[in-house]
Amino acid sequence: MDITELTVHELQEKVKNKELRLYDITKAYVDKIEENEKDVQAFVTILTEEAIEKAKKIDEEIKNGEEVGNLAGIPIGIKDNICTKGVKTTCSSKMLENFISPYDATVVEKLNDEKMINLGKLNMDEFAMGGSTEYSYFKKTRNPWNLNKVPGGSSGGSAAAVASNMVPWALGSDTGGSIREPASFCGVVGLKPTYGLVSRYGLVAFASSLDQIGPITKDVYDSAMLLNIIVGYDEKDTTSSKQEKRDYTKALKNDVKGLKIGVPKEFFGEGINEEVKASLEEAIKTYKELGAEVEEFSLDIAKYSLATYYIIACAEASSNLGRFDGIRYGYRTKEFKDLKDLYRKSRSEGFGKEVKRRIILGTYVLSSGYYDAYYKKAQQVRTLVMNEFNRAFQKYDVLLTPTSPTVAFDIGSKSNNPLEMYLADICTVSVNIAGLPGISLPCGVNKENMPIGMQLIGNKFQEETILNAAYTFEQKIKFRENHKPAFRKGEE
Amino acid sequence: MAREDYEVVIGLEVHAELSTKTKIFCSCPTSFGAAPNTHVCPICMAMPGTLPVLNEKVVEYAVRAGLATECTISQDSKNDRKNYFYPDLPKAYQISQYDKPLCEHGKIEIEPSTGRKAIGITRIHIEEDAGKLNHDDFGRGSLVDLNRAGVPLIEIVSEPDLRSSEEVDLYLRKLKSILEYIEVSDCKMQEGSLRADVNVSIRKKGTKEFGTRTEMKNMNSFRSITRAIEYEIDRQVDVIDNGGKIEQETLRWDEVSGKTFSMRDKEDAQDYRYFPDPDLVAIKLSDEYIENIKNTLPELPESRKQRYLTEYKLSEKDANIITSSKYLSDLFEQASKICNNPKAVNNWIISDISRILNETEMDPLEIPFDSKQLAKLVILIDKGTISSSIAKKVLVEMFEHPRDPEDIIDEKGWVQISDEGAIKEVVLKVLENNPKSVEDYKAGKEKALGFLVGQAMKETRGKANPQMLNQMFKEELK
């Protein structure tokens, strides 16, 4: 048995039945990192020794009859823009290459409360800006299904690490699709919760009104389990929401009879790859067979989402990233003649090209004389997008779309064409614009055995509905049993 | 043209530090004077990933200030980011309020020599203070102290209704006293907790259009504000009379040379790129919330003044001076209650205390003794333990080395001599040494008596009871 093939709920079972010690689990992952990391390059920081020590300690506690939670000793990987006290948080940027946060993010505190074990910090596009993890300052993470392909992004390290069994599950962050797109590219499950469900305190901000932390897991059940841990109102984040505590695993009923699924036709139009389209049509058929009521409808406003998204996200980013000025922490240029020179050089040298592109774009749209035409207009469109989704959810429980217009693309094929890269977000951004929950799960593979992702969108705080819809589908098609990452190198 | 041909137009932006215990977006203390970077946390140091949480007290204090200046309180308000780079601004943006301030359309009444008038308050909004740069004296660079970063401020923006430095002075004093009365700011100008940006322009009398204005930032003393305005008016008149144009710019007032200097830096043409702060939710205030604050507002200076006119029969002028500061006014009321001699307390505050405050540029708040001690001083005079001339010396001592007046007169041996035997001894000695004056007095020169009493006082170093001296001399000279 390869321990690392198991989901967390399967691991839990084996720990409970004393078939496995926590040490065995962590050791198996450490070995797997040893084996796969050289190909996949998912980690920025690896914490194997500390992880093994912690696992041994918790085994000891269990042996001594101490009460530990049922997630104690379970390893996890954390995207490198989530602050971890005492461990580097780099955002995959030269700017924060040696930055160690003095505090833990709220979600990390929650993991620590469960005594979960941090196996390492995972690679990403610099400051979460990108859709391929190629914009990491440190390394390009590779897609375990085909090492010549990107893993998606920005949480590419998280998705690739889960897909290649180097961590049982991971935390990612999603501003415009950064959990869902890499989950789709890597054939795993990625959930972006409703805006406000999970505290953002300690998530290095990209776009504050869009960012959410969420789970990337092997299956839907694990997704529900990890969501259980990280949700909750946080007094340190006033945009977090006071919601009744619930057990999301209880929502997984393996039943979608009577579920009303809306399929917005705009998400199946131009630019969507034919194989992706075919796979999604298969999925729709599956849902119908399972007893769901599926109907096509028009979500016309969606076509404005991408432009709206890039204006709002870049505007917020241009302000959020101002603090990286070389004064208190982070990269500072070696030589400078005055204060302005210090700012200019530190920021020019410390940030990568894509980050600078977005800062400049964001600065522009907020500038006097342009604010009304861009930022203000984008906020107005945002309201319209929300309204249109609201109308859709009066009719449907779940909306079904592709996660990405394509499967994972070749490394280097889009990195010099920002607009094409931005278009990869077309199916995911409107979910962030409207603050809704969205989950991506694999629904098939293409001819080249690359996974195809399906996105299910729910109404605000209706994670239970989309989790159940996803779970029921997953139980039916059994993707993990039928498809495995190949770790092959395609034709060079 | 002469200066009289121009009308002066002045508007003020006053920043007042709020006296909340903790900062506006984190729980660090706001107290002044701590070692650098000890009142800081990840939030006010802008560590990556941190988020602000609005201190509700700040909203309450700002609403109090708004209500006390007759503003309309906005029930739907928000925080905005003002973006710019400076090392004292760790987030590279200041959280402030842009287009939806908490309070708008208020006014403050003043009484300049030209007659009572209202000065409009455009708006009052909340924002965070920046940190402080400590420049190394040896040119080795600057050090950043973030203790002040995130201390809550309100910015009170006036309409351009002020027409002279006198009006500015009165407006500022009135505003300061209101903020003290409602206990939202300690208004310590020397510590920078009350500071003003002064916008000055001039226009030909009779014209409606405003002239180009200049701005003097961060002024924090009444005296320099008045001086700076006077200088700036003269400068602007001069420029225009010589065919020049006023440039819209920020000026720096130099206290030593008594001049303003341009701080012009073309690159500093700032575009702050204001936008709503997505980390903070909208500020929604209910009618009930505002009503509650209104009901708990304390008595304001205007109403106190009216009460002093009737209750204590103070003159308008005295009542104005005393109520200008909540501290002075409290001192007056409390001391009066204890010694039961409001007239005397009033005199002490109006004359000697005010004089010392002026001479030392001390804020009433910094008076080192309390109402009990002032009352004791009055009682000591009333009981005849000390003379009023000794009392003046005691007061100076109370300012310099604060302690109870009894202790001072004990230590200094300033107790008035009222013992008949002792007085008589002195009187006889003086008479013996001044035969000429005795002769004069007997010849009908009343003045000579004053001289003799003076000599006796000199002999006793001011401690003899002057009434007793007077009486005893008259008796001896009969």
Image (spheres, coloured by chain):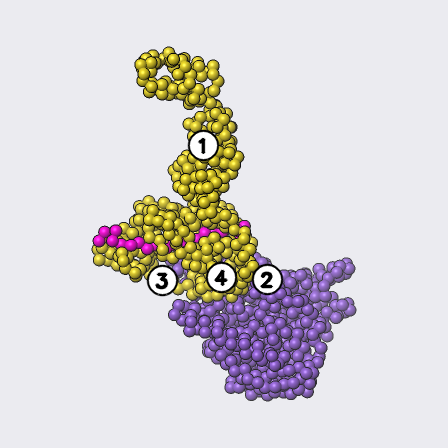
Q: Which residue is mark 1?
A: B395
Q: Which residue is mark 4?
A: B74
Disc 4 crowd rating (10 Å Cα; few below 14, some 14-19, many 20+) is some
Q: Chain of mark 3?
A: B
Q: Which residue is mark 2?
A: A105
Residue that appears at 70% across and 68% down = A25
Q: Nearer the viewer, residue B132 or B245?
A: B245
Disc 2 crowd rating (10 Å Cα; few below 14, some 14-19, many 20+) is many
User: In the displayed structure, would residue B246 be above or below residue A358?
Assistant: above
Separation of marks 3 and 4 at Cα, in angstroms: 31 Å
Disc 3 crowd rating (10 Å Cα; few below 14, some 14-19, many 20+) is few
What kind of residue is marked 4? Ser
Q: From the image, state whether disc 3 or disc 4 is nearer to you.
A: 4
Separation of marks 4 and 2 at Cα, in angstroms: 35 Å
From which residue to which does the magenta span run?
Answer: B1-23
Residue A58 position, x and y percent, is 71, 61
Is the residue under label 2 in contact with that under label 4 (CB below 8 Å)? no
Q: Which residue is mark 3?
A: B269
Separation of marks 3 and 2 at Cα, in angstroms: 38 Å
What kind of residue is marked 1? Leu
